[in-house]
Amino acid sequence: MRNIADLYYGRGKDDFGTSESFVLLFRSWRLLGFITAKPYRITNLMLVVFIWACLIFSPITYFGGLVLAMKELPITVVLSILGVAINCLALPTKAVYIRANLYRLYDVETIFKRLDARYQRPQDQLLIRDLVKSCTRIFGIFFIVYWIYGIASALAGLFAHKYPHDSYVPFIDWMPNSNLKFWLHFSFEVVYAQIMLQTNVTNDSFPAIYIHAIRTHIKLLTERVSRLGTNPDLSEQENFDELVDCIVTHQEVLKISKIVGSILSLTTFFQFTVYAAIVCICMLNMFVFGDATTKLVTVSYIIPVLWQTIPTCYQASMLVTDCTKLPLAIFHSNWLALDKRCHKLIIYFMQRTQDEISFTAIKMFQINLGTNLSIAKFSFTLYTFINEMGFGETLKERLE
């Protein structure tokens, strides 16, 4: 198995496979307990139980901290906790849903291996190698963007001698005030936040990575279709078999899209629903209430919030564009050189490929850049409305 550096730079003599694009995803899921490590050991099982307990109780932890913060802490801290708490609302549901559907992603890997076997030309292998590099880098960017926020919030809390997120931690919070209580709570919050962040890194990046893999195979199929009838060494039967195999390949890509789309539909819906509210809260905290430190931490938080959906929406939009090129490639292929059987199949194939591969969030939102931009506009409109109504300034004056 290749190491991360080889995947990132596309190094190695062996042929790359599409399934290698998902290596970091599955390693992260295994680390988080989504995939139970074998052989089964008590320490591994205890770690899995701890991580899943953190995920399931994360809304209680952060909303409990929010209730306590509203009594004692300034509005900037309350808004910061509120943004994190809202983001945690969907986290357990997303995690449970993805865990329940992981076996379907294994089925997708099997289909991708069958598709890879059809592309042995050096040009095709290079495209698959580029896919592995791109998917590894997508995961890496998610990791860096999310963990910058985790590190920034921890450092801000450390320098200010405050808790990074002021979450509610039973047992520790019941202790009398002391340095021991502070450092136990601080350490637990930092570890807790890293678990949440790594879970979000994995669960938020998987749609973009899988859609990018589908895009690559659409491109490979488009290139393959454009070569139909151009090889004079192939017999009529061989040309017919090649066309049939192209149709079968397209059907398998559609099958992959259906499986992936059914999983990301719910997870992306949750991201869209909390996206606008969190951005609005962050803008209030930055432009109305926050000081310099608060603004810095808020910016480090709003960037991963925006990044949750942008790569997925971008890949989905580009997939639609790539799909439009496939029927054109069929039409411009050398189909006149094929026999009558192929002509009938060509018509059928063109009709099938005119249906673009697109994804929806539980049939309510089209997953593309247009939807992402519309939600961003809504969050800015909401912030402008609150600001124009003077709600923020009025609240600030009362608190002061």
Image (spheres, rainbow, N blue to C red):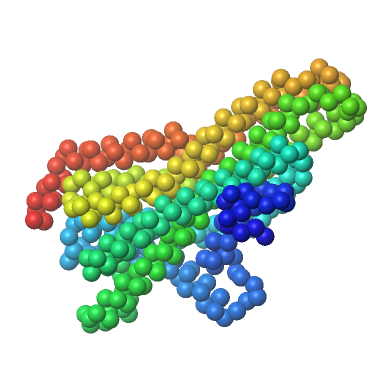
- Does residue 263 show up? no
- The residue under the point 32% across, 77% down is 184
Which residue is rendered at x = 87% and y = 21% of the image?
Answer: 339
Residue 347 spot, x, y in % from top left: 75, 23
In front of the other: 232 or 376: 232
- Left or right, 153 with reference to 122: left
Image quadrant containing the N terminus: bottom right
x%, y% of residue 296?
A: 27, 52
Would residue 258 be found to the left or right of residue 269 on screen?
Answer: right
Q: Quadrant of residue 297?
A: bottom left
Q: Position of residue 84 (x, y in %)?
A: 33, 57
Left or right position of 222 against 211: right
Q: Nearer the viewer, residue 307 or 124?
A: 124
Residue at (31%, 60%) from the top-left corner? Answer: 153
Which of the two residues, 374 or 164, is positioned nearer the viewer here?
164
Q: Which residue does the image show at 82% across and 32% down from the upper left?
A: 242
Residue 234, picture quadrant:
top right
How many marks overall? 0
Q: Nearer the viewer, residue 230 or 92?
A: 230
Q: Is residue 195 left or right of residue 344?
A: left
